[in-house]
Amino acid sequence: MAKMEMGVVGLGKFGYCLAETLVEMKQSVVGVDLSENRVKIARELLSQVYRADATDKTALRQLGFHELPVVVVSIGSSMEASILITMNLKEIGVDKVWVKAISEDHEKILYRLGADLVIFPERYVAKQLAHRLAVPGLLNYLPVGGGVVLQEFVVDAWAGQTLRQLNLPTKHKIQVVGIRRPGEVEFSFVPQADTELHKGDVVVVIGNEQHLGEL
């Protein structure tokens, strides 16, 4: 994985968790928050973290945000602040600006300002939970557009059979694209047709959401 330097504006629960995960993935993160306490806590995690008002375009330039390829704006309940910060980041030349939204109207405004991606964490988690409740054995659900989704399942009934024997593309119009054995951390992708599945394996499948639901 190539190392990138990214910015996170707003180090509340979502922003801090995002920065923490990026650091775990060996990425470089520049954090900014107006709260002295949040900045103090983040200093234990980030080598570059500043107390500054991100609604000030000059402050963003002085901190070098115009040189970052990606910046995530994670401002709590202040729609006005996130809108102004998003506008400032695009005006100083940040290529990709991702923003946490708090309402659909907020989302519309952000996209009109040029935000490249708008995130609703609560809505995303709610959809994940709904699919896990409705589909036994489902671990994760990721829509990729056009009715196609990636899903993770724990192997049970398929145990002891090979992918060739299951013949999932023909029978169910889905494809297994990754397998993780019990105790393993990483997935093995593009498995061979003669790969046998074992109880407890985690498989990643791709296909139409309707077909996966029927399966």
Image (tube, helix red, strand yellow):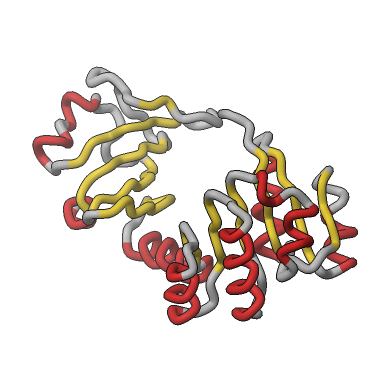
Residue 7 at x, y percent in the picture: 68, 51
Left or right of 90, for residue 43 = right
Q: Residue furthest left?
A: 170
- Position of residue 8 in the picture relative to residue 62 (left or right): left
Name the quarter where the N terminus is drawn: top right
Judge left or right: residue 213 versus residue 116.
left
Asked if residue 138 lies left or right of residue 117, the reply is left
Residue drawn 52% across and 70% down?
122
In the displayed structure, 64 sits above or below 167; it is below
Q: Nearer the viewer, residue 3 or 191?
A: 3
Q: Position of residue 154 (x, y in %)?
A: 39, 43
Q: Is residue 105 above or below residue 88?
A: below
Quadrant for residue 27, please give it: top right
Q: Residue at x 29, y 50 (%)?
A: 149
Determine the image quadrant of residue 204: top left
The image quarter containing residue 214 is: bottom left
Residue 210 in the image, given as x and y percentages of width and height: 18, 57
In front of the other: 58 or 100: 58
